[in-house]
Amino acid sequence: MSAWTVVLPIILGGIATLAIYSFLVKENPFYRFFEHLYIGIATGIGIVFTVQRFLWPELFRPMLGYDREVFADGSYDRPWRSWYLYYLIPFAFGTLYYFIYSRKRQWLSRVVIAWSLGVSGGYALKGFFAQYMPQIIGSFKPLVCVQTVERSLLIDFRDVADRLPPDAEIVKGRIELYRLGPSYARVVVKDKEGKLSEVRGRVTDVNENPKDGFVTLVVNGQEQKIPAADIVLREDVAPAADVRDAYEGHGGKHDYLAYRVLHPWPGQLQAGESPQLPVRLQPDDVAGTAETNTGLALLVREDVTVRDPYRGGRWTVGKRETVGVKTVDLSLETLRTWYDRPEANNGVELRRNGGAGGSFLHRFASSENPDTARRPKLVIEYRVPGEEKPKELVLQNGLGGYTGATEAVIVSGEDKPAPPGPEFLLGASARKADGGLSLDFWSFKGIVADWIFAFTLICVMTYFLFSFEHDKPGIYQASMAGRWLMMLCFGAFFGSTIMARMALLVERLQFLIEKFIPTILGQG
Amino acid sequence: MSRLADLLAKLDRRAIYAAVALALVVPLLLKWALPPAEMEQARKFHSAVEALPSDDNGIVLIAADWGPATKAENEPQTEVLIEHLMRRRVHFALVSVIAEAEPFLRDIPERVVKRLTTEDPRERWEYGKDWVNLGYRAGRSAMIQKLAAAPDIRQTLGVDALGTPLNEVPCMRNTRNIRNVRLLAEFTGAVGVCDEWLQFFQTSAYRPPMAHGCTSITIPEAYIFVDSGQIVGLHEGVAGAAAHSALLKERYKERAPDTAIVMNTALAVAHVAIIVLIVLGNLGMILAARKAGGAPAAPLGKEGAA
């Protein structure tokens, strides 16, 4: 490629750019010449490309048989297909359009126009449903909306690469987590006569109403509304009497007291504890909340600084999981990345599989659980050159001096260190990082946005509805509001327009500064 | 005060153009790269790319439906996506329904490869293995429907932009039909093109997730598709490309600032200049009205504009 084939387009481009922007000074022939030149070039390119990329390869080439390979003896790889000549029928039909210039035979062009309109109408009808139905459905916005606090867990195993030999070939790997039993609660209720009664059972939902500071526990399907200050969390199971003592010790100021039991599996039950609890610890224990419990997923986090985690490589832990060890296989790609690029090891994230509203509280043993065997464990199988049998690397806090496993809480997209404790909770309405109960709360942002949407819709429609007079009270104000709201929207459109025009100017200035001027000065 | 009012009232519009040009030129000359604002939709676009597996069983289809008229905004968007896909080793195919896009389909990937290999000379990206240029395809909505319904895209399109049969292109080895398109990324400033992909690039059983890059002027229209969930991410003009670029920088620390960041910085400075000029213009109007002893022009009201 000669220097001129590079330099000439740059010089011409620079001159053309300056010519077009000379309009800002005033309308001039220099500007007008280049404007017409642009339009001509654009049309010319369109024609050339249509012939080069469509008419010739798709229509004429196969029709004339030029798409066949010719062998050395002059024969072809396949016979000429005469049916390609049928292409001439729509081709000839299309050329009828040119009869638009004939006064006598103009009707022939109308046949083509009618055909084109019919085809376009068909396309439009097909496209309408694909494009507009989701938008119409999306515009039905709730005027009262509830936002759920999502809490997921980030489990991080550090020093993975350091603990593997430098020439290891990773075969497979898995993470083992210990799922604890579901949360149980006891709620002591004092009736109007001052008599104490007790409700106990599995907690299926925890909701807090920020309006009055009450927490709602759904225990065995019964809703118990308790002041947030009266929720007592316990690490172990206490005899029933303790609950009543705690209530009395609390001063008996309130009518309710919730006593939340965190480890109610059979082995840890204390003497005198109700035999009903172990009975409920069956494998299908989670089934009762299937409408909100949508299972858990383990995700590989490639970068914790990005708030929206990497959604690839999802492994469902299960909808109806039992108490005990849960094994989740990690992909080879993930493990090799952790090995090759230790800085890319940002752990895995355990999160609910979607759904909205209150949810079952999933509980897992943390890296600080007193029982070492229940702590999160990373197992990697690898091979060392020269050895046939694969080896196993097991990383678990407290095992072989390893202390690199940590957990972090992700609440509403924000990473926070997990609160110290033997377990972590996750779900849509789990305990918050500060120890308080997480909640489903009114989404004021959502409510305001949706009300503005509805208000704008009504007002703008009122403005454009001319079937009635706009001077009536209420109608006039709505119509005026519609006009003002539209002006606000047009302002936003105008801002976008300015940005678009500026971007074009920036790009041209960049071209002038980086290419045109250095070329003119002989530095290009 | 009176002198200022006169000055502002008589200010030549060409002086305003010169001020804006100056505000744009200075950051460009200084190669000033301010961190762009975090943009929700660009982050979603980035996440959608992050979620793609890097294997041979599918491709990302990039519809670069733009030409010189919207190059300023659509080029940085396309470039940052191509860079992201190349870094993640996700195969992609470039196609366009706009004839003027042809040279850009060829140049942008090559430019990105050059930049990436300068950054890390050990890495290699090759045409055919990592990406394919399907070129300009005439027919717009008819072509899009043909592509969506094709039992074998390779047979339907035949050859790439260089004339190589698609059956022989390694990265298209396992791409048969629309189900192998893992993401459709559409960049355009032309009216109706995004709509056509949205309407017709689907079958009754499958619609690939779609991300979109639009010019600033069409942002309000594009947000309709965001609200309805029809697109999974959006590049809002140069600002969107710059936000995506910043997310790449967070992960690839050695990455040099690209065009999008520099352009976005110049744009930000120009916006500040325009805001200052608007304030000055209004000040001039108020001062002129006071001088004349009247009130500034009445805002829209009952007797205002129709």
Image: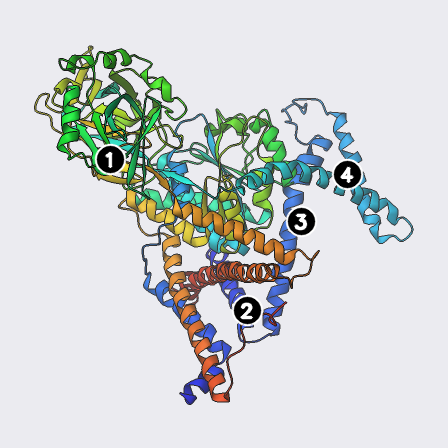
Distance between mark 2 and mark 4 Cα atoms? 41 Å
Asked whether disc 4 touches disc 3, contact meaning CB atoms under 8 Å apart, the reply is no
Which amino acid, mark 4?
Phe
Residue B111 in sight here: no
Q: Secondary structure at mark 4?
A: helix
Residue sitting at x 54%, y 43%: A139
Which residue is the site of mark 1?
A: A409
Q: Secondary structure at mark 2?
A: helix
Asked whether disc 4 touches disc 1, contact meaning CB atoms under 8 Å apart, the reply is no
Residue sitting at x 57%, y 76%: A26
Distance between mark 1 and mark 2 Cα atoms? 59 Å
Of the two numbered discs 1 and 2 on the same chain, state the one appearing first in sequence.
2
Q: Quadrant of residue A463?
A: bottom right
Which amino acid, mark 3?
Ile
Residue A297 in the image, given as x and y percentages of width and height: 33, 26
Residue nearest the observer in this picture, B289 or A301: B289
Residue B190 in the image, given as x and y percentages of width and height: 58, 50
Residue A428 in sight here: yes
Which residue is the site of mark 3?
A: A47
Which residue is the site of mark 4?
A: A91
Which residue is the site of mark 2?
A: A19
